Amino acid sequence: MRVLVTGGAGYIGAHVVRLLQERGDDVVIADDLVTGDVRRVPGVEVLTVDLASLDAIDVLSAGLREQRIDAVLHFAARKQVGESVERPAWYYQQNVGGLANLLIAMENAGVARLVFSSSAAVYGSASGAAITEDAQTVPVNPYGGTKLVGEQLVADAGRAFGLSAVSLRYFNVAGTGAIELADRARLNLVPMVFERIDQGLPPLIFGDDYDTPDGTCVRDYVHVLDVAEAHLAAIDHTVGGRGDHEVFNIGTGEGTSVRQMVDAILELAGSSLEPEVVERRAGDAAVVVASASKIEAELGWRAAHGLDEIVGSAWRAHVAARVDGRMP
Ligand SMILES: NC(=O)c1ccc[n+]([C@@H]2O[C@H](COP(=O)([O-])OP(=O)(O)OC[C@H]3O[C@@H](n4cnc5c(N)ncnc54)[C@H](O)[C@@H]3O)[C@@H](O)[C@H]2O)c1
């Protein structure tokens, strides 16, 4: 199979590129390299294009035709929630505009198979220990809004030109499959705790008075290698021309509290720092854990890696970056 991976030089996309190559698929990447890095994907052809730019439709249509692409995995998006609150119009232009351009190019080139990177952010402040795909979707920030509109756009395109598509709603993606593929964004709990340890400062816990066993928020952490495997199952599930759109959660179904996560990282780092509990952050739901039953039943996928591997792999990549500067 010949696959176009948008955002393939990014954290999750590059993991998927590697798996596709390992199973013998041919890969081409489309990426503007703003947060992506070609060093993650040596030897892979990269079309350098901002998907939201005016010439993106022409560049993508030509690329899809010339490369005789069978299917597209669409990761390219801006993903900083805070930034999306400050620059909502730009976020919609980038994430929804970029997707619209991609869909027009796919229709032009007759490519009718797509996997779209959505997010648990579409559920907004939904709280629960087993959030199913039919839970209410009320995003609480523009980033989540772009993902929900993106899903709707994909579904509409499916009906219009026979696109067969899957949207995957990732929960908390973490860990790394290789040091050079690690996440470089300092936005999530794991890298934030690493940074505090580096600075000799206590890791922060935002609120310990939630209605959870240890009072701290509970989340569903899923290893990026498992997320990558889910994409192979999803793309194999699509069949061009069917006009269908299916939505799946990507999570483990297991909750881990912030305190459990922080303790696991401190232990691994051999740190004696005591976490410091500070005020709750606005908008944090108590428990956000996926029901992972639908994807297991329909695509046969389930997460295989545990918390130890998530934290251990991320920590090894962090230490390597400190030692030899392999990552900024
Ligand atoms: N990391 C997570 O925890 C998480 C959770 C839920 C959803 N997602 C989604 O998964 C996808 C991949 O996320 P990631 O963590 O790998 O992020 P990332 O920033 O590492 O990768 C995104 C890639 O897309 C590229 N890109 C972004 N906007 C582009 C544009 N307009 N045109 C061309 N290229 C563009 C970037 O250069 C980068 O290579 C995104 O759609 C994100 O919203 C991520």
Image (spheres, helix red, strand yellow):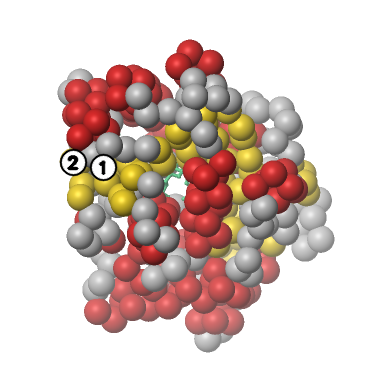
Identify the residue under disc 2.
48
Q: Disc count in the image?
A: 2
Mark 1 close to ligand 1, CB under 8 Å: yes
Task: Please state, as top left, top right, bottom left or bottom right, where the C terminus lies in the image.
Answer: bottom left
**Label whose residue precedes the other's in the sequence (1 or 2):** 1
Q: Is residue 237 visible?
A: yes
State the mark number for residue 229: none
- How far across and how far down the image is residue 324, in percent? 24, 79
Secondary element at image label 1: strand
- How far across and how far down the image is residue 283, in percent? 62, 38
Identify the residue under disc 1.
31
Asked if residue 129 is positioned above or below residue 139 in the image, the reply reads: below
Asked if residue 114 is positioned above or below residue 300 in the image, the reply reads: above
Is 201 in front, or is 163?
163
| Type of the residue with mark 2 | Thr
Q: Are marks 1 and 2 in contact (CB under 8 Å)?
A: yes
| Type of the residue with mark 1 | Asp
- Decide: few, some or many residues near mark 1? Use Cα within 10 Å; few <14, some 14-19, many ≥20: many
Residue at 45% across / 66% down in the picture?
A: 176
- How far across and how far down the image is residue 182, in percent? 38, 64
Asked if residue 175 is positioned above or below residue 73 in the image, the reply reads: below
Residue at 28% across / 67% down in the picture?
A: 327
Secondary element at image label 2: strand
Residue at 27% across / 59% down in the picture?
A: 41
